[in-house]
Image (cartoon, rainbow, N blue to C red):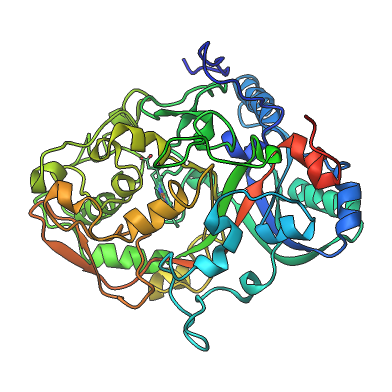
Amino acid sequence: MSQTSFTQPTPGEPPVDLTNVQGDVIYGLPKTFEHFFFFTIVKPDTFKENLSSLQFTTSDDIVKAREAILGLKAKTPGERLQLKLLNVAFSQKGLDALGIEGDLNDEAFTKGQLQDALALGDAPAMHGDPNKPNWKPAYFERIDGVFLAAGDCFTRTVEVLNDALNKLQGSVKEVYRLNGNTRPGDQRKNEHFGWLDGVSNPLIRGVPRPPNVPEGQGKVDPGVILLGQTGDYQKHTKNPRLRPKWAFEGSIMVFRELQQLVPEFDYFLEKNPYPVPLPPGIGKEVQGSRFMGRWKNGVPIELSPTSDDPRYLALDKINNFDFPQAPGDAGQEACPYSSHIRKMRPRSDIPVAEQEATRINRKGITYGPEVQPDEQSERTTMYERGLAFVCYQSNMSENGFRLLQMGWANNTHFLKAEKHMTIGYDPIIGQGNGLQRERNTAYRQDGSSIVLPADWVVPRGGEYFFTPSIKALKSVFAGKPYPE
Ligand code: N7H
């Protein structure tokens, strides 16, 4: 029987105040629609005066909402709980615009994502200045902050945002909005390439554990996600990282608009099936599963390399595995070193202390329409779709998103020494400034590699944000002193 309640944290774990942490950071906003509204603050005083009148959704609200959703599902299957949810986050420019003092001590956050784009491996602009990334024009504007408005239906999501904007009395100017929506029908939990998403996120010590969480998520100290909390350490010294007081229980939020070229990706897999003697037609699926490290239904190929046997979807199996440590090909017989989930969470491939410190909490949503028949027949993307990628961590420059993207996904040598072979790019998100369109990615059991003709995930913009605690929003962000 499925469990319908959150379980309290183990005694002795560092306490986290769920009423103080914004809702998306720990559990994610339980959304069908999520609108990202990027803004510039044009009247800082008016903004500060009115911010306290907005009702921000806390992690405690999410616990209650999720319990209500589960209760409703059990009583009236098919009925959806009405939800109106709101979070906010600020860039360094936003902190400056509001005159908020104190260094968050995360270098890349301070510089902003635009300055970081080429280092992240984003392709340079096709026309014009090659020192700029090939981003949408809006992301070159000054972005001070972002509202995350979410709900169970489009109308309520729009209402949440409009209500917030009305209360702010013209103190912000819209720069851009990206409307996310879950996919329809049985694809609801899947991203646009068709994989089940949101399988593996860390559990956090000191917070109630959600119901029906698979084993093997791995627990992390709250400070891996929340600034100033236990576990928010400097990478090398392990000393607590210096943060301003108001940063406590806030989190660094990475936002990336990642376009996905679905018909092109599918066509490549079709033309390059994995050459194994398996039932006809399955080679395409095997190839895709070896890129991802999971079958589309979520089954990990480390446990089930030749079929997507649904028995491996059980909560005690889907995430409960480690990678073998034999060097060379013997260590990637089932799951290639370069597969997306192995690059992004190398589990036993890296030392235990690093396994915990490098976890991120992913809370994105898909955007754009389903693949249309004309796109399918022409094998070409005609309508924009992708992932509004969001992840939270306390430290983005050393341990979190940037390490995963630059140090691991884009690094063809990642773990070379230990594995005695070149590993290749992450075939899903690895990128090399678009210049090396022919990218190798090791994938076969014999270590030989496949050449990928293009990037199927294309960054179109983004920004680094800080998601403040509720206490900080009510004090320093509203122009008042932070309570001692
Ligand atoms: Fe990835 N996908 O849906 O195809 N990702 N990801 N990701 N990702 C994961 O565990 C995907 C991206 C991570 O703990 C799964 O939820 C797509 C970036 C991490 O075992 C699937 C895009 C970064 C994990 C996808 C994308 C990450 C993970 C397996 C871009 C960070 C957990 C299901 C459009 C830099 C690994 C799951 C673990 C898993 C997809 C981007 C990180 C299916 C389409 C940019 C840490």
Above or below residue 103? Residue 205 is: above
Residue shown at 31% from the left, 67% from the top:
267
200 vs 260, nearest the viewer = 200
Above or below residue 95? Residue 120 is: below
Q: Is residue 366 something that shows in the picture?
A: no
Residue shown at 68% from the left, 72% from the top:
141
Residue 423 % position (x, y): 20, 56
Above or below residue 25? Residue 447 is: below
Residue 457 % position (x, y): 42, 64
Residue shown at 76% from the left, 51% from the top:
100
381 vs 450, nearest the viewer = 450
Going by the image, does 390 lie left or right of 58? left
Q: How many marks?
A: 0
Residue shown at 35% from the left, 70% from the top:
432
Residue 198 % position (x, y): 46, 40
Going by the image, does 126 lie left or right of 84? left
Q: Residue furthest bottom?
A: 128
Which corner quadrant of the image does residue 321 belong to?
top left
Q: Residue furthest top?
A: 11
Q: Quadrant of the C terminus?
A: top right
Which corner quadrant of the image does residue 39 belong to?
bottom right
Q: Is residue 48 something that shows in the picture?
A: yes
95 vs 74, nearest the viewer = 95
143 vs 62, nearest the viewer = 143
Residue 202 % position (x, y): 45, 33
